[in-house]
Image: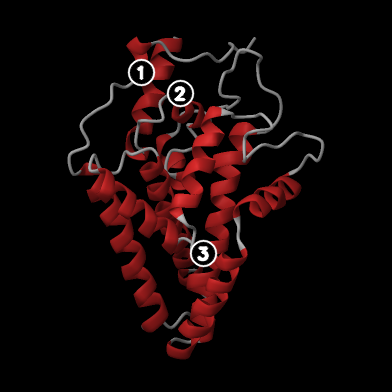
Amino acid sequence: MRPVAQPAPDSVRLKPAPLGYRGVAMALIILTAWAGLLGFLLAEYQPDWRTPGPYLLVLLQTHLYTGLFITAHDAMHGVVSANKRLNNAIGTLTAGLFAFNWFPRMLPKHHAHHRHVGTEDDPDFHDGRHPGFLRWFLRFAWNYVTVSQVLLMALTYNLLKLWFPQANVIAFWMVPAVLATLQLFYFGTYLPHRGEHEAHNPYKSRSQLRHHLWAFCSCYFFGYHYEHHDQPYVPWWRLWRAKELAEQAAR
């Protein structure tokens, strides 16, 4: 019988650690890699779609897009920088680069998700009456995507194709943004929160089996989702350690 998930005792939780410049450094690595690769793919790269290279680059750019949102998410929990102004500035920048999301609008919704997970007050809530990935995703998108975002994306697309090959703009700017949105929803909302949860599971969330490489590649360790809800002060790049402590305590 599977053990009932309960909050980890303080003895097996990661203790909040001083951020120093590590959170900012992680954010800058993702930002620099995303911008540098995108610039190259738009301005210099001539894809040969008969080879695997362009497809792998689409996946890599998708992963970096996902990293932008994960950075914004960490900023929502104040774990990018101890300097609140810098933390929120990085959150606003990375959220904006990810399809023009507006950080101040997302912030209260995300904290509502943590406070009211799995209830009618949860903005990510799925009541199960319309099961399946697609319906849940459409409801989720309806709750978060705004008309202004769509218009700004359309404007940016039309501006980019004035300077860069249209095919490159679609393949390396538009497609990765869509794939990253699906990736974030699938690994960060659908898999951990779908279905029934034990009555004593306070976060109504499950966690994937420990596999650090897959957890990083799939969604920056956010498959370890129970650990995130249990310890939201832990930045993405320490969640693997929270998972290990939880498994050690369960033995």
Q: Quadrant location of the C terminus?
A: top left
Percent coordinates x, y for residue 89 in the rendering: 31, 54
Marks 1 and 3 close (CB-CB < 8 Å):
no
Q: To which residue does mark 2 refer?
A: 230
- Quarter occupied by the N terminus: top right
User: Which residue, given by chain and number where applicable, does mark 3 sit on?
Assistant: 176
N-terminal of the pair, mark 2 or mark 3, is 3
Residue type at mark 3?
Pro
Q: Is tag 1's residue or tag 2's residue first in the polypeptide sequence?
A: 1
Q: Is residue 246 above or below residue 174?
A: above
Q: Mark 1: which secondary structure?
A: loop
Residues at circles 1 and 2 in contact by the CB criterion of under 8 Å = yes
Position of residue 110 relative to residue 169, above or below, is above
Provide residue 26's location: percent of width, then percent of height: 27, 48
The amino acid beneath tag 2 is: Asp
Query: As drawn, which residue projects farthest toward the bottom?
Result: 162
Which residue is more in the foreground, 49 or 25? 25
Q: Residue at x 40, y 42 (%)?
A: 76
Q: Residue at x 48, y 15 (%)?
A: 7
**Camera-side residue of 90 and 15:** 90
Query: Quick one: which residue is furthest to the left in this view?
Result: 20
Binning the other alpha carbons within 10 Å of mark 2 as few (below 14), some (14 to 19) or many (20 upward) gives some
Frontmost of labels 1 and 3 is 1
**Image check: 17 left or right of 121?**
left
Task: Name the residue that disc number 1 marks.
Answer: 13
| Mark 2 or mark 3, whichever is nearer to me | 2
Question: At 35% from the left edge and 69% from the top edge, which residue is drawn?
Answer: 37
Up the image or down, 57 lies above or below 227; here it is: below
